[in-house]
């Protein structure tokens, strides 16, 4: 059995951080609408431009987390379920939806994952990371999406030859797979450490602002 390193534990805290900040349905919409805008001559109209920029800053951190998970042999077994489980009716909401979102559980049903990936989300993570690393040779995927989504230029005009439909599927796989890790494998300690770190950061910011006000 491979023990979990501090670096891997930090990955799960990062996943907690992402989904504490934004819910899965909203994150799906940001990915889908920004890719549609970037692949056309229309500007993204979801919210303000800064919302899209901040979202991709957070999503970049989540993606970097998945690259570490994909490269590691360390998995939390709680995230992996028996392949014989009945997936037809999605009655077992606890497999894909946290308790405080149960009233809207239909919005959290994975739609981009295969049955095998639903049972083992690490498979989806590895597949998506391989595709993105192979496609995004210059490591500027998210900057390109933002640039083209917020302008009237499209991928085609910039000679970006990505398979946009497949890119959308792979980015959505990352969202859904990491959300399954969030629901199944992230512990109360992960959430507590995230919230405690966030609280300390807020206190530091308040202290800094107070010092600045004095000067």
Image: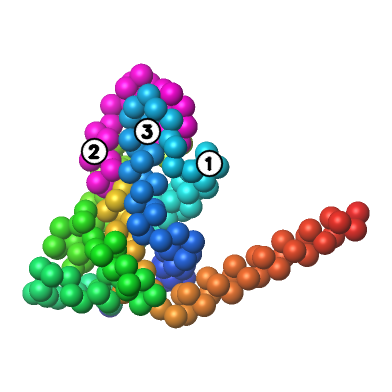
**Earlier sequence position, callout 1 versus callout 3:** 3
Query: Which residue is label 2 attached to?
Result: 165
Q: Distance of mark 2 from mark 3, alpha carbons?
A: 13 Å
Identify which residue, 19 or 152, lies in the foreground: 152
Residue 127 in percent (x, y) is at 23, 51
Query: Which residue is label 3 attached to?
Result: 37
Residue 9 in percent (x, y) is at 43, 70
Q: Nearer the viewer, mark 2 or mark 1?
A: 1
Q: Which residue is drawn at 13% across and 62% down?
A: 115
**Earlier sequence position, callout 2 versus callout 3:** 3
Identify which residue, 49 or 9, lies in the foreground: 49
Q: Residue at x 28, y 56 (%)?
A: 125
Query: Quadrant of the image for the N terminus?
Result: bottom left
Residue 2 in view, yes or no = no
Q: Distance of mark 2 from mark 1, alpha carbons?
A: 24 Å
Which span is picked out in magenta? 145-170
Disc 1 packing (10 Å; few <14; some 14–19; many ≥20): few
Q: Nearer the viewer, mark 2 or mark 3?
A: 3
Q: Which mark is residue 48?
A: 1
Above or below, 8 relative to 26: below
Q: Which residue is drawn at 39% across and 27% down?
A: 42
């Amino acid at each position: 059995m491979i023990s979990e390193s501090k670096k891997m534990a930090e990955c799960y805290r990062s996943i907690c951080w992402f989904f504490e900040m934004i819910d899965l349905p909203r994150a799906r919409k940001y990915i889908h609408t920004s890719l549609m805008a970037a692949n056309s001559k229309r500007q993204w109209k979801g919210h303000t431009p800064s919302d899209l920029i901040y979202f991709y800053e957070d999503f970049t951190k989540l993606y970097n987390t998945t690259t570490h998970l994909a490269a590691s042999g360390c998995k939390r077994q709680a995230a992996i379920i028996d392949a014989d489980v009945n997936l037809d009716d999605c009655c077992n909401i606890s497999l894909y939806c946290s308790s405080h979102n149960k009233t809207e559980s239909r919005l959290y049903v994975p739609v981009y994952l295969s049955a095998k990936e639903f049972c083992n989300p690490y498979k989806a993570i590895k597949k998506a990371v391989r595709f993105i690393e192979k496609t995004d040779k210059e490591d500027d995927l998210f900057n390109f999406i933002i640039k083209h989504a917020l302008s009237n230029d499209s991928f085609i005009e910039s000679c970006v030859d990505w398979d946009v439909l497949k890119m959308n599927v792979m980015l959505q796989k990352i969202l859904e797979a990491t959300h399954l890790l969030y629901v199944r494998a992230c512990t109360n300690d992960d959430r507590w450490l995230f919230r405690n770190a966030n609280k300390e950061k807020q206190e530091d910011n308040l202290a800094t602002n107070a010092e600045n006000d004095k000067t």
